Amino acid sequence: MLKITILGASGRMGQSIVRCTKESTDIEIVGAVTEPDDAVIGSDVGEVCGVGPLNVFLTDDCESALQNADVAIDFTLPSATKENIRACVATKTALVIGTTGLGNEESKFLESGAKKIPLLYGRNMSVGMNVFMDIVSRTSKSLGIDYDVEITEAHHQRKVDSPSGTAIALGELIAETRGDELTDVAVYERHGDVGARTPGSIGFSVIRAGNIIGDHTVLFGGPEECIELTHRAVDRMAFAHGALRAARWLTGRKAGFYTMANVLDL
């Protein structure tokens, strides 16, 4: 039985993982962590998530919640990343991170943590999205620089980072196939008289509305044709199932940095 601790257990993704785990026969929740000022601290995480009592109680003490875990799954905030990695290193617990919006500083923590524990980071934990990324990369390699690229993403009104980590990851993949760095070719804003499109640029458009879980479209626009590739998440359980698949795969691995591409052999 794989034993997991969920970091960010009372959030939307954390609750999805609790519900997903309830359906599994090979995974047991042994710890549930939330932020210090959360009103549900001390409550049974199963009751909070609507699956019935699990006899696992929400706490803000990360290290204590990790004591019996094989793997931790982190869906929190970038501000919590350093402490979560530190706690997992201290308890020698493998770590799956699905938190979005990580910057350069948090990325350094990922690299240092991966030298001491098995650490898997995914900007998007959906199995389908990771296959989609592989398709986009291969399409970009085949089409080449003659096709303009526009990436459009849509999420719910409460999402705070923009563009999404997934959209940026898609842009990085495409830029890599062209021998570019995304930072050199990305266009995040267009307003007023911006002039003609710069050859080789990668444009981003962002939608925030309603309760959209996550839509991503990549448009390849050529001189005589256009190709649109789209992935649409219709239920957060897609991310939860992907995170649990990653946790199963990560168990027993040596210290190192891994991604969903390793899990799916892409």
Image (cartoon, rainbow, N blue to C red):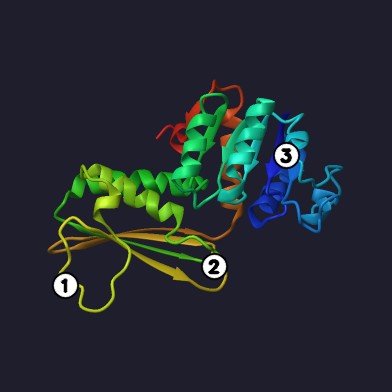
Q: Measure the alpha-carbon separation of dots 3 and 1.
A: 51 Å
Q: Position of residue 172 (x, y in %)?
A: 33, 47
Q: What residue is disc 1 on?
A: 195
Residue drawn 78% across and 34% down?
A: 64
Disc assigned to residue 167: none
Precedes in sequence: disc 3 or disc 2: 3
Q: Amino acid at mark 1?
A: Gly
- Left or right: residue 177 versus residue 146 is right
Q: Measure the alpha-carbon separation of dots 3 and 2.
A: 29 Å
Label pair 3/1, CB-CB below 8 angstroms: no
Precedes in sequence: disc 3 or disc 1: 3
Precedes in sequence: disc 2 or disc 1: 2
| The quarter of the displayed image where residue 153 is located | bottom left
- Left or right: residue 152 versus residue 154 is left
**How would you rate the neighbour count of disc 2 (Cα within 10 Å): few for under 14, some for 14-19, many for 20 or more?**
some
Q: Is residue 97 visible?
A: yes
Residue drawn 45% across and 53% down?
A: 165
Q: What residue is disc 2 on?
A: 156
Q: What residue is disc 3 on?
A: 62
Residue drawn 67% across and 50% down?
A: 14
Residue drawn 56% across and 30% down?
A: 249
**How would you rate the neighbour count of disc 3 (Cα within 10 Å): few for under 14, some for 14-19, many for 20 or more?**
many
Q: Nearer the viewer, mark 3 or mark 2?
A: 3
Q: Position of residue 55 (x, y in %)?
A: 87, 42
Q: Secondary structure at mark 3?
A: helix
Q: Measure the alpha-carbon separation of dots 2 and 1.
A: 31 Å
The residue most toward the bottom is 192
Q: Position of residue 260 (x, y in %)?
A: 48, 38
In depth, the one of 121 and 189 nearer the eye is 189
